[in-house]
Image (cartoon, rainbow, N blue to C red):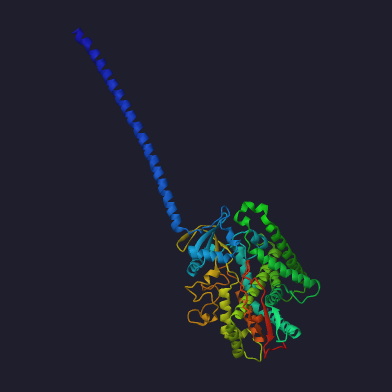
Amino acid sequence: MAQFVNKTPICNLCQQNTNLQSFNTNKLTNSCLMDLSHLLENYTLILETIAISVVIYCLSFLYKTTTTPPEASGAWPIIGHFNVFNGPDLPHVTLASMADRYGPIFNIRLGVRKVLVVSNQEIVKDIFSTHDVSVSDRPNYIAANILGRKGASFSFTPYGPYWRGIRKIISQELLSNSRLDKLKHVQVFELEKSIKNMHELWKEKKDEQGKVLVEMKNWFGELNMNTMLKVVAGKRYTGGDGEDEEEMMRCREVIKEWFKYFGQFLVADALPFLDCFDLGGYKKTIKQVALQLDSMVGKWLEEHHRKRSSGDASEVKDFMDVMIQVVEDDDVAGYNADTIIKATCETLIAGGADTISGMLTWTLSLLLNNRYALRKAQEELDTQVGKERRVNQSDIKILVYLQAIVKETLRLYPATFINAPRAFTKDCTIAGYHVRKGTWLLINTWKLHRDPKIWSDPCEFRPERFLSRNHIGLDVLGSNFELIPFGVGRRHCPGIGLAGQTLHMVLATLLQNFDISTPNCAPVDMSPSAGLTNGKATPLQVLVSPRVHALINL
């Protein structure tokens, strides 16, 4: 019994030990299983993370290749496609070749900046019908910042209240039809004076064949500079005496430099961290041009202020008078009144004189290379206007072939081959592609105007196309996206009315008064020059003689 009783505790103890060992074994086993489970979970998490990352990468790569415009190859390290604007060919030609390879919408890279290049009517329509506000900003590059007076110039100020205010003043006060009508006597006077001077030159220097050699680029340039200076600031480029004559000559040269550098991209525009080095000294030169122009225009503004303070300002004689009356607030968007007036007048003088002179030069060059069109234009003048009186502005509406000549010239040789750059202010979808905020936009007008899907024989000069059923209703106001020589959207050129009036009147008056040809009937060189505006690279020397019925006694 005792033994039995004594055995029980021992057995119980053994059983407890056995249970304990079993418990410890189970505990260990469970612990190992839990650790293994956690390890497997971690591995699974890692694998899932890797898998998700790979999928995201692949999807992002796929998204990028299918929804962003293709980027042109040939980019240089760091600076990208900067060679497009400094290569052997002019930028519009290089970009047109890229469009042939990559399509009508593609990207190039200028250092750290993305630039979207477009050369198709439908895509341009998509942009400016749907996203006009989003592409109404201007990129802030060095030349525009300096020559545009840090945004005071309406052409290159950012899109916003200041731009809208200045644009309203220009459209309603300066370049409105009523204002142009009040100042049209200036254009009439300057044109008649230029025609009379050419007659006098012919009398003095005509050769045995009764012709005189005239350089027409200079002739058009002086005529339009005189007109614009008179309309804007009450000055004349030629015809002054002594100091005034020298000042006007300097003005023309400075404005040439202004346009030359306004359209120039510097290395520091692509790589902003190089700005402080001023590679090539371009920034210093641009600042000197800006100072010279500021000095001249500032002098004219002071003269206007003195006249106004002395009480001799009862009559508004020019745009500068209008601006002084309208811009009274001395702190508009951080600019004082004088800065706004000078910036606006500089842009109007330079823009009006240079672009219109260039377009007239191209028009006459095309006519001299297509003599049938020149003869037809003169025949229309003789029939519709007659030979007994001078052509006037009211005649232009019946000179339909002359209008067609101007349109065809603006198609082939618009004021700018590449529209002034824009900048996207928010992400947009263009032609199915995703375009990021901050991207620059360039419209290759030269390429767009030569689209064979729209224009038959697109490189040929054929004014008759604008008298045909397909194109007779097209205008150059920016509403027809296949013909945009003055730009498109909110920031199209506000001087379309002035340009159209001048182009038609100068051409009609010139052709009514003179027969024009080239020495030895040689073709005219049509090579364009580099710059913001599209100018002819070489002089335009022509032989001029009065027509039999010319109205010499002007």
Q: Quadrant of the N terminus?
A: top left
Would residue 176 be visible to someone looking at this image? no
Question: What residue is rendered at 58% in x and 83% in y?
Answer: 373
x and y percentages locating residue 345 in the rendered image: 68, 69
Q: Is residue 453 above or below residue 137?
A: below
Q: How many marks?
A: 0
Placement of 197 over or under 133, stated as above or below: below
Q: Relative to 371, say whether 5 is above or below.
A: above
Residue 496 x/y as whole percent: 60, 74
- Residue 270, quarter of picture: bottom right
**Residue appearing at x 26%, y 15% in the figure:** 13
Instruction: Give x and y (percent) for residue 35.
Output: 36, 31
Q: Residue furthest bottom?
A: 388
**Given the current orientation, which residue lies at the most extreme top position?**
2
Q: Is residue 32 above or below residue 64?
A: above
Residue found farthest to the left: 1
Q: Position of residue 2 (x, y in %)?
A: 20, 7
Looking at the image, residue 111 sits to the left or right of residue 282; the answer is left
Is residue 109 among the parts visible in the rendering?
Answer: yes
Image quadrant containing the C terminus: bottom right
In the image, taking residue 287 as reference, residue 114 lies left or right, namely left
Residue extending farthest to the right is 242
Q: Residue at x 58, y 84 (%)?
A: 372
Near-viewer residue (35 or 96): 96
Looking at the picture, tell me which residue is in the foreground, 26 or 406.
Answer: 406
In this rendered view, identify the residue nearer to me: 389 or 365: 365
Point 38% across, 40% down: residue:
45
Quadrant location of residue 202? Answer: bottom right
Of 234 and 522, the residue lying toward us: 522
